[in-house]
Amino acid sequence: MDDRDFSIISGLTLLTTLDLSGVTISAVSIYGTDYFANEIPTNTFYNRIGLLSVSLPNSVTKIGMNAFTGCSNLASVNIPTSLSVLGYAAFESCENLNNIVLPNGLTSIEDYAFYGCSKLSAINLPATINTIKYRAFANCTSLLTVVLPNSINSIESELFAGCTSLDNINIPNTVTIINQSAFNNCTGLTNISIPNSVLNFGPGVFAGCTSLKSLVLPNQTRGLGGSTFWGCSNLTSVTLPASIQFMGDSEFQGCSKLQDVTLPGSITKIGNYVFNNCSSLVSIVLPENVSSLGESAFTSCTNLQEIYIPSAITSIGPGALASCISLSKLWVNQSDPSKVTMGTNVFYNTPTNTCTLFIPKGTKALYAVADQWKDFIQITPKPAPSIYSIRTATNQDYDNIVEFDYVAYFNIFSSFNFNNSISFYTYIPSNTNNQIRLHLDKVSALLQIEGINQNDNITIMDMNGKIMISKQVFSNECISLRQLPASVYLLRITGDKTNFIQKIIKE
């Protein structure tokens, strides 16, 4: 057979069953167009809704573009072991196709190959496949589980978008990138394990995954492309590794159950709408290198009570903190508000008359006249909170613009939970040196050591004696314990005049 025979077969509108297993497909050139041997030609059975069953030739190597597109009643296809390429939209919208066996030797599944095969519940992907292209399985609404082969190194854009029944997928450790909207609107996906090989995520990878509850991103992840978790309404926690260098807009927009997230210190920009409508978020610390807070970044975070904005901030976008109706403490470590470009309505519908604005010492006069910041002035004085009984804090006038000594205090305490702040400074004595004090902040995982000598060394070991941290520190220096897993550790400080051992617990 050649393309001329397939043209005749494609016109048999009442055809229901076709067995081509014994056929050889020959090459032919018709009116300047070449048709290749062992290939099901383009559009051969396009929209043949009566077709129920097909057995393909035993020698076929490629199913051409749109070969079976729209065969909505096709339920059975026998594919030979000779097949190497499944063409563009080959089985698109074959709504009754519920099972298909792909042979070893298949190397490529082209764009839209099984798009809209709404009854396809499982698919075997042979180890010979090295390419699965755009939307190949998108809108396969009955697809439950997928095991991807180790032969692929990327998950292409929208590959499983709209697979609403997908609840389990195995991603091999050969994959380095998950592209745009790969799992968009996979509403049945509750959990997914991502290997450490994945370095980058394209925009909207998990957008609309409304059943996804938690996710740990690989510890080598470099970047998020934007809208990564947009609309993940049941997401409660995300672990972001320190390796992340950039995040896009709307990363967590609409994550209404997200209560806590720790942003990597390498982040320099919080984009537009990143936490918009995260109505369960209670507190957040922006990393010290963040210079820009985007438009509506925290709009309608209705349970947000406390936020820290670092000294590097130079731009705050329109409505960035609008409708944060529970905001009670706003920490801004910028010494000159005139250096911050303010968008319109930054604090619209946010209670600036009751929220306390904490600012660097000596800057109150500047903030009291600065655009939008001056809205925090409260005419009626209020008593100093108990936090100011601690030696390092200072307060002036006790209204709701408060000058604060960040250098001496805030850098070692960023949890914002001042109800228990006294216990944070609990004196921890040593048998050999009663001058040393430890200040351990559970939220930021920062440890400050007070009272040691210039040349002292610290060592932190786990309970098996493995050294986790070893370095020379100076008095009052902060040490990050964020990289350590929750456990019990031994802290030892040694020097010419120092010998200090203390058990510490990281929860």
Image (spheres, grey):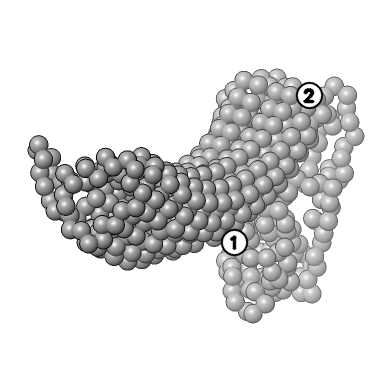
Q: Nearer the viewer, residue 108 or 443?
A: 108
Q: Can residue 465 be seen in the rendering of this structure?
A: yes
Determine the residue positioned at 68% across, 41% down: 256
- Establish if 125 lies above or below 364: below
Q: Residue at x 72, y 28 (%)?
A: 323
**Closer to the camera in the image, 161 or 473:** 161
**Mark 1 or mark 2, whichever is nearer to me:** 1
Mark sitting on residue 483: 1
Residue 403, above or below 432: above
263 to the left or right of 127? right
Q: Which x, y percent locates residue 177?
A: 42, 52
Observer-nearest of 181 and 127: 127
The residue positioned farthest toward the right in the image shown: 383
Q: Amino acid at mark 2?
A: Ile
Kindly give the residue lying farthest to the front in the view shown.
14
Give the mark nearest the N terminus, 1 or 2: 2
Q: Is residue 327 above or below residue 235?
A: above
**Residue 252 spot, x, y in % from top left:** 60, 41
Against 103, residue 355 (above or below) is above
* Residue depicted at 67% across the width and 47% down the height: 234
Give the quarter of the figure containing the C terminus: bottom right
Residue 377: give its label.
2
Give the Cα distance between marks 1 and 2. 40 Å
Residue 197 position within the rendered picture, expressed as x and y whole percent measured from the top left:
44, 60
The answer to whether mark 1 and mark 2 are in CB contact below 8 A is no
Alpha-carbon neighbours of circle 2 within 10 Å: few (<14), some, or many (≥20)? many
Q: Which secondary structure lies at badge 1? A: loop
Which image quadrant for residue 29?
Answer: top left
